Amino acid sequence: MAEKEKPYKIVVGIFDTITKDIRDSIKTNCENSKPLGVGVYTDECCETSLYTHPLKPTIHRLQIAEGLNGVIFTFPVDSILPADIEREAAIAYQNYLEEIKQIEGLKKYKAGFVIGSFDLLHAGHIENINLASAMCKDLYVVVKTDERIFDRKKKQPVQNTTERAAVLMSLKQVKGVLYYDLDSNRRDVIQNVIAQYEKDHPGEILEEKDIVAIFGEDLKEKEEERKRRGDWGDVNIEITPRPADKMRTVSSSSYKRTMETNGGLASYEKRESESLIDETRAKANESREDDEQSK
């Protein structure tokens, strides 16, 4: 299919860490009417063609890519050859067209929120955010600030508050990001959600009974006890599955340990940028090269 006839655009990368380059690329390539597809290099392709070992498995990196705002379809990439990438993209696009009929069901609540550090976004975060989003019209993510994390765990996060918030705002299921700072309590969280929702929907009033707080099952007993004590007021509590065996391998702490032994965050971010294939940038580079040759 000729480039001018292609009904979609694609970005290809590793998608281990959602760097600024990744976010900017997605945003730039969304600035036209064509659906955007994301190709994610498989583990084998990373090792045999890019000579690097990904932090997260292919299936989890695909989930992260699919969760990004503006991404319509995703596909695994087993080759660095442009023709092979284009063939896989075309197949994925056709699959997207076949599934486009699926319509979001009725949402149970007007607004909902999840709370967390989200330090190194991973597939478990995406899965929980997707489950939470299915329950409410607008989903807000409440991010624990660097100061709060250090006060509770005596550790600095790998990514600072600003970077973690930027990554979360790039997710299509997230309406907005709020902050859980050192001096915040649960009542503050509720009031901040209400204030942001009413700002997003001028003239509409949001009551606590129309809000849901979503937690993983590892926090079930603790948060349900807080609900009984009245800490959450009239806000509803919903629990999502979070199997302990999965959390041992799909968790920020496990990825941090691996990252620390392989050069730290900077090395992963550098690799991410170097592996990124972006059609918009490629065209800009071609244009610059043509200009230089014509001089």
Image (cartoon, helix red, strand yellow):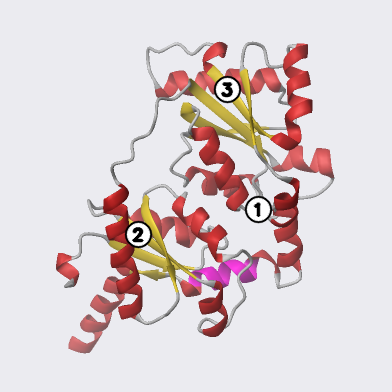
Residue 163 located left or right of residue 77: right
Give the overall secondary structure of the magenta segment.
Answer: helix
| Tag 1: amino acid | Gln
Q: Residue at x 57, y 29 (%)?
A: 113
Residue at numbered disc 2: 37
x, y percentage for residue 181? 69, 32
Q: Residues within 10 Å of mark 1 (few under 14, many from 20)?
A: some
Q: Residue at x 54, y 33 (%)?
A: 132
Which element type, helix, strand or loop, lies under badge 2?
strand
Q: How far is mark 3 from mark 2, CA to CA?
A: 32 Å
- In terms of image quadrants, where is residue 292? bottom left
Q: Residue at x 39, y 20 (%)?
A: 201
Q: Which mark is residue 212?
A: 3
Q: Earlier in the sequence, mark 2 or mark 1?
A: 2
| Tag 2: amino acid | Gly
Q: Which mark is residue 159?
A: 1
x, y percentage for residue 180? 67, 32
Which element type, helix, strand or loop, lies under badge 3?
strand
Q: Nearer the viewer, residue 268 or 250?
A: 250
Which element type, helix, strand or loop, lies under badge 1?
loop
Magenta stretch in the rendered image? 266-273
Residue 106 located left or right of residue 58: left
Inspect the magenta stretch and tell me whether residue 271 lies in it. Answer: yes
x, y percentage for residue 205? 45, 11
Residue at far front of view:
98
Q: Is label 2 or label 1 in front?
A: 2
Res 160 visible: yes
